[in-house]
Image (cartoon, rainbow, N blue to C red):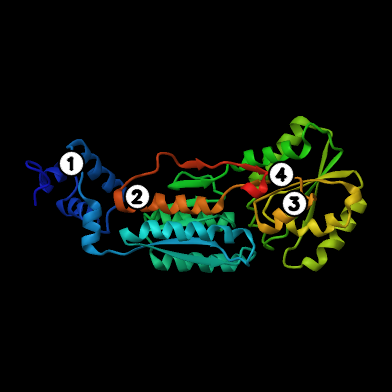
Amino acid sequence: MDIGQNVTIKDIARLTGLSKGTVDRVLHNREGVSKKSYAKVMQVIKDLGYEPNIYASLLAQNKKRQIAVLLPNYRKGEYWELCEQGIAKGAEIGKPFGIEIRRVGYNQYNLGSFRKACEEVLEMDPAGVILAPMFKKETFVFVEKLHSMEIPYVYVDTKLESNNYLAYYGIPLYQSGYLCAAILTDRQCPKEVAAVRIQRDKQGQSDPTINRREGFEDYISERWPQCRISSVFIDPKKPEEIDGILEEFFAAHPDVSHIAMFNSRIYLITPFLERHPERQFRVVGFDNLSANLAGLNKGVVTALIAQRPGLQVQHAIEALTDLLVFGKVPARNDNFMSMDILTRYNAEYY
């Protein structure tokens, strides 16, 4: 089989130092080729001025490939629902190339559920994986297995610091916390700030907002070193207990006039805030959930920092599709997206 007028598979094999079988698998987009070998072949082909019609080859084989999207389960109106539109759009983009998207869910408060979901993904032997890391230690174990199996993976929403991920699509985590503190204090010098946090897994592994909190704390310590940051924990699975927890907390912390919440659930405390308009809290949260926007429109939430999670997932699927079909690697690992500041005066146009 000639590659061009004068170039053959044998020539490419000689130039790359690979076997003719490996070169043939690359040209026909077959499995069993490492990323390193694939890159070698594609570089030689590029140097020779020949671009193989990978798209036509793939369609001729009618080959199906799966991308696993490993994300937490959710109820209607919760943050992870915002990802579904991106999954649907990404699936439409990949469909003509034989790419199938399979969503694998888990309980974000249960380490065992996450482990089981990871096992399910590994058993699939997918062509690529998209995930939002919730359990740090277990995620490291999981992505190391993906790396050893030469399965590319992309982070969305949050990421772990490592060298092997293909790409990250999301807002800059540390900077988002820094921004949150800047909006919250807004040239003011509060005596005490309340950080409302979520009770998560009993093992303490799940802490997806840690980098955001670090950015927040650094801003406060740099700009307002005399300001105290006090944490209060609430359980979203026990909403009936939240009011009592907040009543007790604010009774013990009368100097708190500013409240921040680093995840998507500021709506959990808006009923309490509505019943205490006399306190005139300044409140900043994250994400444009409908329940959060309701608090914004009522004036009990000062601002929301939104991040377009659906677009993050769509871009992640596109990146893996480009890699699997065309051998195109993202230009950079970290693809930071905009941090959109919403107030009651602009949110309806978002």
Residue drawn where x is 71% and y is 44% of the image: 345
Residue 225's quadrant in the figure?
top right
Mark 2 and mark 1: Cα distance apart in space: 18 Å
Mark 1 and mark 3: Cα distance apart in space: 58 Å
Q: Secondary structure at mark 4?
A: loop
Residue 76 drawn above or below residue 248: below
Q: Which residue matches tag 2?
A: 323
Q: Secondary structure at mark 2?
A: helix
Residue 44's quadrant in the figure?
top left
Lower sequence index among marks 3 and 4: 3
The numbered disc on residue 50 is 1
Q: Residues within 10 Å of mark 2 (few under 14, many from 20)?
A: some
Residue 221's quadrant in the figure?
top right
Q: Which residue matches tag 3?
A: 297
**Amino acid at pointer 4:** Tyr
Lower sequence index among marks 1 and 3: 1
